[in-house]
Amino acid sequence: MPKTILEVTDLKKHFTYRKGLFSSFKDQQQFIPAVDGVSFYLKENETMGLVGESGCGKTTIGRTVLRLEKPTSGKILFDGRDITRVPTDELRQLRSHMQMIFQDLDAALNPKMRIRDILSEAITVHHQISDAEVEKRIGDLLEQVSLKKTKLSNFPHELSGGEKRRVGVARVLSVGAKFIVADEPTSALDVSIQAQVVNLLRDLQKSLGLSYLFISHDLRVVELISHKVAVMYLGKIVEIGLSDRIANRASHPYTHILWSSLVEKQSREASQKARSVQAGQWGVFDFERPAAGCRFAPRCPVYESKGKPEICVAPSTEPQLKDIGDAHQVACHFPL
Amino acid sequence: MTTATVLKIEDLRTYFYSRSKQAFIRSVDGVSLEIEKGEALGVVGESGSGKSITALSVMGLISAGPGVISGKIGFRSDRIRKNLLQDLEDFVKLTTRDGKIMEVSKDVVGWGQNTERAMKKVRGKEIAMIFQNPKSSLNPFTLVGKQITEAIRLHTSIKTEPEAKDRALTWLDRVKIDSPRLRFDNYPYGLSGGMCQRAMIAMALACEPSLLIADEPTTGLDATIQSKIVDLLAELKSELGVTTMLISHDISIISRLSDRVAVMYGGTVCDYGPTKEILSTGFESKHPYTSALLASIPSAQNIKEKGYLQAIEGEVLDTINVPAGCRFYSRCNRVTEKIRERCARHEPDLREIRSGHKVRCWLYFD
């Protein structure tokens, strides 16, 4: 039985913003509930995929779990230790166990440092070791991510997208992290390079026993790499389960629409079939005023087809995650 | 050139001179394509394979800096008929020493004027283009509606503002923007990415062009929005018969929307034929790059059958030092001993292997 490496309970992260200079005196502070009560756990050697449209709070979860953002409320247990309120000076030590692969590597790699310096900096931050050892460690890392040694003296802008990605992965591995948040690691890459990166991440997981929180909006990649998938909508997890079940036997109307929109692109016939499942309006969602009751109701085809039942929009009855067997949970009053 | 051909690109070469490396970056290196009236041609390939540069060359948007174009782009519609690259080569002088190009001198002003003269009646009016990032291609300081009416008044016979507004509203409605009257008076920041793209499509089509070039129309949009835009394009195509050149690296979009496909690799077309043959897994005789590309997409079928993705090893071609032989040779997994020599030394031509299907690979010619 593998042990649980990360456990998140009722995590909330609200961003506040002010309207005008004196608003704080007038008590007009408004907040955006980017993550609004999320619970999940992650076992060792396991990958959890996190999908959803842009702006639903995927990245915020990743950043909050690593304590790059201060959680508003809730509890984060990492390796059995509560890290929700760990003071900043202890965080550094913690970060040698948990790391993040950032989405935009053009921004994440210092353009004025050579690859060798980028890697050796990451190694020496956490471990005081001699130059010879650093050199050896860099050699090992390059081998792990299959990057050529000649690239060490290059600057980030001289590398291709796939190579930059490999440097990003190598830098994360250099500190010896066991738990990695991978934020859109394959977006903006070509399909052939994307496949290389996905395979690399899977191989590393096998050989080093890593756990990933894999954030992406590319549903197919998530389905492929993850053991579990959580689907998010407006700061909440609406469905969570084994990736095969989510992809093929989704219960939440939103998940269903997400996956069928993939099929729709592919062929005309499939598109007809998918459309009969989803009717309903596709308005733009509004983060500042989440609908009362179920957040998805205004866009939901089931809500529409059932004749707009009261329970979906009643303020007190926001659907909670319910177990429907096989570790498959769904937050919906009328699961498909 | 048959009567129904709208665009015929012959041996297009677009090079950029890099001063620091003293060499040409051969972005597009001998591309020949044809688009028939009412047809949708899909162009797929990795980034850096020259898809977008081909489109920009057609639009006459390669002007700044040391870019060099040669070849012929024949364009023909009900109204005009011309070679869009007429006389452009006269404005560039190359100085070579020992077979290496030492200097490129370009009459930038003359080049610019000539392009403008050639493209004046074509751009926007005959050939319209939708760009990759809708948010950044709309002017942030101008109302969305104003931008559309401006294009209409410039390119069509409609010259008065109220008439143009009518037409713009019809088209906004046509591309299914909700409450078009409201959106007409919005600034682009008030529109979501999907709506911006719809507005772009409306602007492009409102002038009734003979050819629409869509350069990555769905990249950067959410999956759900993507499928809506694809739906819209499919609908417009079947109802209005818009002739389209669709550029994308997303194979699922290409397979849904296009009739024929050109697969590009390293500045050349390596596989060119009907969508059904090229993008179906059942059809065997295609370019090894096409097969590898199809195997590397995370499609439902690939996941189910193999459980992992077949990556194409190696890196995208270096378009400065183009190798002597086949451009895909270093990454190809189907080289046999019999043809190895030839693959490494000589570049294959794009030859027809069956009616309407051309492949650039030694595997199919003996």
Image (spheres, rainbow, N blue to C red):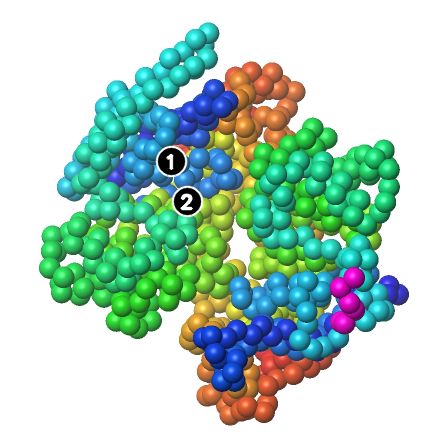
Q: Are marks 1 and 2 in contact (CB under 8 Å)?
A: yes
Residue B219, position in %: x, y?
46, 52
Q: Which residue position is annotated with label 2?
A: B247
Q: Please name whichever residue, A243 or B94, is drawn nearer the observer in this view of the structure.
A: B94
Instruction: State the SS at label 2.
Output: strand
Quarter where residue A69 is shown: bottom right
- Taking the spot 65% from the left edge, 83% from the top edge, the residue there is A320
Residue A88 falls within the magenta-colored stretch: yes
Task: Describe residue A326's horizontal placement relative to residue B200 as left or right.
Answer: right
Q: Which residues are magenta?
A: A83-89
- Taking the spot 68% from the left edge, 46% from the top edge, the residue there is A168
Q: Are marks 1 and 2 on the same chain?
A: yes
Q: Residue furthest right?
A: A1
Amino acid type, mark 1: Thr
- Taking the spot 31% from the left edge, 58% from the top edge, the residue there is B141
Task: In the rendered view, tell whether residue B167 sits above or below residue A198.
Answer: below
Chain letter of the residue carrying label 2 = B
Task: Describe residue A64's horizontal placement relative to residue B41 as left or right.
Answer: right
Chain letter of the residue carrying label 1 = B
Amino acid type, mark 2: Ile
Is the stretch drawn in magenta largely helix, strand or loop?
Answer: loop
Task: In the rendered view, tell whether residue B271 sits above or below residue A334.
Answer: above
Q: Which residue position is annotated with label 1?
A: B54
Instruction: State the SS at label 1.
Output: helix
Q: Residue furthest top?
A: B98
Residue B83, position in %: x, y?
23, 30
Residue B312 in view of the camera: no
Residue B311 falls within the magenta-colored stretch: no
Q: Quadrant of the N terminus of chain B?
A: top left
Residue A104, position in %: x, y?
58, 50
Residue B277, position in %: x, y?
47, 41
